[in-house]
């Protein structure tokens, strides 16, 4: 039987680990700027599939990779195309929102600036 202090310490350690996994999953949207571990993100090219999750990629694929990358699930190694695709779709939504706002402002300006005939 373990001591309650040790049990609580282990539970906190596991909670921190699972929280970190959640942060990493949530953060893999768009082009990464920093890894959750604090490491820099670099762009590299895979000469051949060298990690277990590279099964569906061709040699020469580009990745956003943490400079401290270890294949433990705590660091970024995201295919370049996924990051760029997410970023482009986010930017398209932002541009569409701005276009709608501009159209509303144009309608507002034209409806308030019409000269009235007396």
Image (spheres, rainbow, N blue to C red):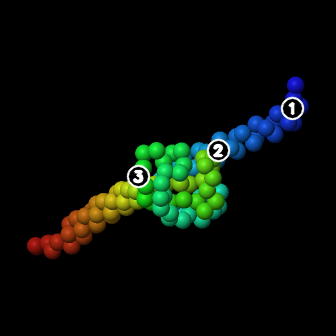
Quadrant assignment for the C terminus: bottom left
Crowding around mark 1 (Cα neighbors within 10 Å: few <14, some 14 to 19, many 20+) is few
Residue drawn where x is 43% and y is 59% of the image: 60
> What element does badge 2 sit on?
helix
- Disc number at residue 19? 2
Quarter holding residue 96? bottom left
Looking at the picture, how far across and down is residue 1, in whole percent? 88, 25
Picture layout, residue 16 above or below residue 83: above
Kindly report which numbered mark, 1 or 3, lies closer to the viewer in this rendering.
3
Q: Name the residue under label 3.
A: 58
Quarter holding residue 38? bottom right
Q: Name the residue under label 1.
A: 4
Picture layout, residue 112 above or below residue 92: below
Whichever of labels 1 and 2 marks the residue nearer the N terminus, that label is 1
Q: Nearer the viewer, residue 16 or 37?
A: 37
Q: How far apart are marks 1 and 2 (CA)?
A: 22 Å
Q: Distance between the residues labelled 2 and 3?
A: 32 Å
> What element does badge 1 sit on?
helix
Residue drawn where x is 75% and y is 42% of the image: 13
Kindly report which numbered mark, 2 or 3, lies closer to the viewer in this rendering.
3
């Amino acid at each position: 039987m373990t001591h309650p202090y040790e049990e609580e310490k282990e539970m906190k350690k596991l909670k921190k680990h699972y929280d970190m996994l959640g942060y990493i999953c949530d953060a893999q949207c768009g082009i990464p700027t920093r890894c959750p571990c604090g490491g820099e993100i670099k762009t590299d090219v895979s000469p051949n599939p060298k990690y277990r999750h590279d099964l569906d990629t061709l040699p020469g694929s580009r990745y956003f990779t943490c400079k401290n990358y270890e294949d433990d699930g705590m660091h970024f190694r995201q295919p370049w195309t996924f990051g760029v695709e997410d970023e482009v779709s986010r930017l398209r939504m932002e541009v569409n929102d701005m276009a709608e706002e501009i159209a509303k402002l144009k309608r507002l300006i034209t409806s308030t600036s019409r000269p009235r005939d007396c």
